[in-house]
Image (cartoon, rainbow, N blue to C red):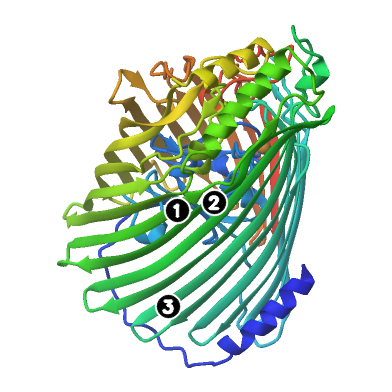
Amino acid sequence: MQSKFLPLVLASLPIVAVAQDTRNVQEIIVIGVRDTHTVVTDDTLVAPSDTAQMLRKMPGANINKNGELTGIAQYRGMFGDRIRVSVDGAQVSGAGPNSMDAPLSYAPVALLQSLTINRGITPVSAGQETIGGYVEAKTYAGEFTNSGDFSFDGRTYFGAQSINDGIVASGFFSLANRNSIFRAFVMNESADDLEFPGGTIMPSEYKRERFDLGYSYRSGDHEFSIDLARNNTGDAGTPSLPMDILSIDSDLFRSRYSFDGNDYRVTAELFGSDNAHWMSNFHLRRPPQTASMSNDNMRFRQTFAVSDNVGFSLKLEQYVANGSWQYGIDGHFTEHDAVISNPNAGAFYIDNFNGTTRDVLGVFAERSISLSDSIGLDFGARYNRVSADAGEISANLNPMNMAMGMPVMMNNMASMLANRFNGQDLSQVDNNIDWFARFSIYTDNDTTWYMGAARKTRSASYQERYLWIPMEATGGLADGKTYVGTPDLDPEVANELELGFDLETGDFNIYPRLFYKEVSDYIQGTPSTNMTVNQFSMMMANMGMGLPNPLQFTNTEATFYGFDVDADYALSDRLTLRAVASMVRGERDDINDNLYRISPDNMLISLDYRANNWTGTLESITYAEQDRISATNIEQVTDGYSILNMSAMISFDTDTELRLGVENLLDEDYLDHLAAYNRSFNPDIATRSRMPGLGRNFYARLMWYF
Ligand SMILES: [Cu+2]
């Protein structure tokens, strides 16, 4: 890493060596749009190892959990690729075809500075495809000092929790002066299987290491940074998926340059990642046992998957008398491959994805304008060109070269599917137009009203287009169904409206929002009508592999609507009452069905007590029953529940903070609707039954700045 790092830094120095006097840009006051809800550093002293779990406490947001490190962001009923996730400006398209390395897994809690969610209508400048919203993770990067002399600083983050005997230990070290920050970060975390009141969730253990090296330079109006990171995830259970993680080895790169001119700002970003991933159905969970028609060893499966990403963005922001203009171009180019094999039969293989590419090139313009003292308007438009392609695939499902029987029939069917796929026009191009507009109107009585409208598009993912043989490789849907893709899927187009207000009186603040989103050509699995696909799936099911009746990704129609709010009320100087509530409905419009894996209605109420050097929090979290379920995805109803959490944060001095807490204080036994179904053998949880929520968990987190 160091060998790559130094030449890149040296090469970049001449660009930024031109020092200039700092001159402040003219003060521009644009009527604020309170569209974000931020969790700041202090809140990273929480129990979960997975950054995505912090979304649970934000209005409208939640997580789809398939394992302890695999949290997939959900916002207002949309999730996965529909949510644009930025990690320090970079977009990561993970190696796992089931999103085992979902984007937020690349911003571990121990390194996190802040997690921000863009409430409501997302500006087109935030990212390329923001149909479901925008989540931004920022990692801690150290701080410049006020002196020319270098000083050594850093912070450590330690944590331990009882629920899985998990620990996390990390150190961030920096050598900084007023112009430069050299930084390094190292983290190690591991845990055993999770406990719930009825037993143990198996396999849910995990192991992860992370190493970062970075450099920032600042002089006058120039700022430059470059960062390299390595993520090594080892054994990590994902009990809601058909396989578990054996390894995820990723190298990430990102660099950023900005220049503040007199009345403009230029930002350039370049990022990339190289991710390699192994998973299997036998190394952490009980291997395939009995099968009526085949040898047990024949059902062992392992998958090797890789992804490559590069991306860039170039932005110009111009400050004018009553606001700003912003122009930009950006690109994100990804490639994915995955091969399934059997360690007991060397000749067996299935090209799951071969050379699938997805390239997005975008251009946008955005305007932010103060129409009067009390009215603000933002609007903008974006054009994205999305091109996708895939290489030819093949498979060998008859590794023993048998002359007749099941393997021969299955192999013949796979050949038919492969020939059909290879004969199709796999190269696809979409031309997508997005736009948005939002008003904010400040009235007296400390109230600001918001109104927004947008049209947002998303082109199909590589799985949705190029899954050619019925498999569960679906970006982590974890519904237990097998799927096939449709190469020529049309892009989804969402038309959305949002309305709400902020009322801030000082003692009492409330931020409610209503939203409505109609999506035409919404991509969703519908029953496959292809005879070969259906027969193949049936034979697999007969062998004890997957369910019959596969789905095919298809353009359908859908509507999302709901309401979310956060509020706080100061009961006294020391006591604050907070509440966050989220409600969302997701429905198919072309048939009478609900959408799959939509968050149940939920509400958080918390009482915070602030003393001189400590704060205490008592929190109640209530989830309603979810009976608006998808028949298409054979989804199961989940009962409502309520849990209590308690924590205290103690500041020993300005540099040291300790949080002690207990989650699910009463050890309530409940099921987690968004954690899907158990897919591994477990005497405590029936196969394909709803995953339980976690039991009582004591935890400690310590952050020490030095
Ligand atoms: Cu995987």
Mark 1 secondary-structure assignment: strand
Instruction: Say whether disc 2 or disc 1 marks the residue closer to the N-terminus.
Output: 2
Q: Residues within 10 Å of mark 2 (few under 14, many from 20)?
A: many
Quarter holding the C terminus is: bottom right
Residues at circles 2 and 3 in contact by the CB criterion of under 8 Å:
no
Q: Residue at x 47, y 62 (%)?
A: 331
Please state the quadrant of the image where ligand 1 appears.
top right
Q: Nearer the viewer, mark 2 or mark 3?
A: 2
Mark 3 secondary-structure assignment: strand
Residue under circle 3? 266
* Mark 1 lies within 8 Å of ligand 1 (Cβ measured): no
Is residue 40 in sight in this rendering? no
> As rendered, which of 426 and 637 lies closer to the eye?
426
Mark-to-mark CA distance, 3 and 1: 28 Å
Residues at circles 2 and 1 in contact by the CB criterion of under 8 Å:
yes
From this view, report whether residue 162 is shown above or below residue 450: above
Question: x, y (%) of residue 234?
Answer: 78, 42
Residue under circle 1? 387
- Disc 2 residue type (three-letter): Thr
Mark-to-mark CA distance, 2 and 1: 8 Å
180 relative position to 444: left or right:
right
Q: Residue at x 42, y 77 (%)?
A: 266
Q: Residue at x 52, y 69 (%)?
A: 269
Instruction: Say whether disc 2 or disc 3 marks the residue closer to the N-terminus.
Output: 3
Residue under circle 2? 357
Q: Residue at x 32, y 60 (%)?
A: 382
Question: x, y (%) of residue 402?
Answer: 79, 18
Question: x, y (%) of residue 521?
Answer: 32, 36
Residue most toward the front?
403
From this view, report whether residue 587 is shown above or below residue 380: above
- Disc 3 residue type (three-letter): Val
Is residue 1 in sight in this rendering? yes
